[in-house]
């Protein structure tokens, strides 16, 4: 887990810590006793809220890049359907894409790696052995 994700998770959990300390330590100091079941219920609701919100926050929230479109294909593996000499077709997850082999050529049935996108065409190269 990266340091930034750990910090986000701890900041997300601050409300449970503060509310727990308030219910268990501060209120009894003023003579207000809170039943244990009430403390557990409140903390449980806050933890449930974190479970719903945490995936959104830890994945980058609104600043996360969308995982759609041709740009999301970069780094993925494709199967050559039509010889790339240097242009042809590849298949990625059952979809056909126009492709250009940027280093040499690739034959039908070979596996190539997508290294870039140019318009609606993916740029591929044969993986290093």
Image (tube, grey):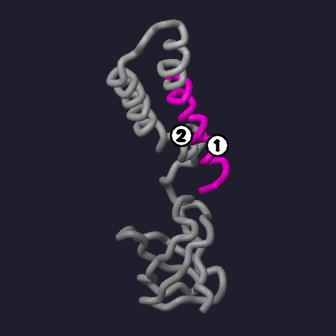
State whether residue 38 is above or below residue 14: above
Question: Within the image, what quadrant is residue 18 found in?
Answer: top right
Judged left or right of residue 52, residue 2 is: right
Q: What stretch of residues is rendered in magenta?
A: 1-19
Tell me the residue at 48%/7% (across/down): 31
Q: Which residue occupies the extreme top position in the image? A: 31
Relative to the observer, which residue lies in front, 124 or 72?
72
Residue 8 part of the magenta segment: yes
**Residue 11 image position (x, y, % from top left):** 60, 35
**Residue 59 image position (x, y, % from top left):** 54, 47
Quarter of the figure that contains the N terminus:
bottom right
Numbered tag placed on residue 57 in the rendering: 2
Quarter of the figure that contains the C terminus:
bottom right
**Residue 105 image position (x, y, % from top left):** 58, 89
**Residue 61 image position (x, y, % from top left):** 55, 39
Q: Which residue is mark 1?
A: 7
Q: Main secondary structure of the magenta part?
A: helix
């Amino acid at each position: 887990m990266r340091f930034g994700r750990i910090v986000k998770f701890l900041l997300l959990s601050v409300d449970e810590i503060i509310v727990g300390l308030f219910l268990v330590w501060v209120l009894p100091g003023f003579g207000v006793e809170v039943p244990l079941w009430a403390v557990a219920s409140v903390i449980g609701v806050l933890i449930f809220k974190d479970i719903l919100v945490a995936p959104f926050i830890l994945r980058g929230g609104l600043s996360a890049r969308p995982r759609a479109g041709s740009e999301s294909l970069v780094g993925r593996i494709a199967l050559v359907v039509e010889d790339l000499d240097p242009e042809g077709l590849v298949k990625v997850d059952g979809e056909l894409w126009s492709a250009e082999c940027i280093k040499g050529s690739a034959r039908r049935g070979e596996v190539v790696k997508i290294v870039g996108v140019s318009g609606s065409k993916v740029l591929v190269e044969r993986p290093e052995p």
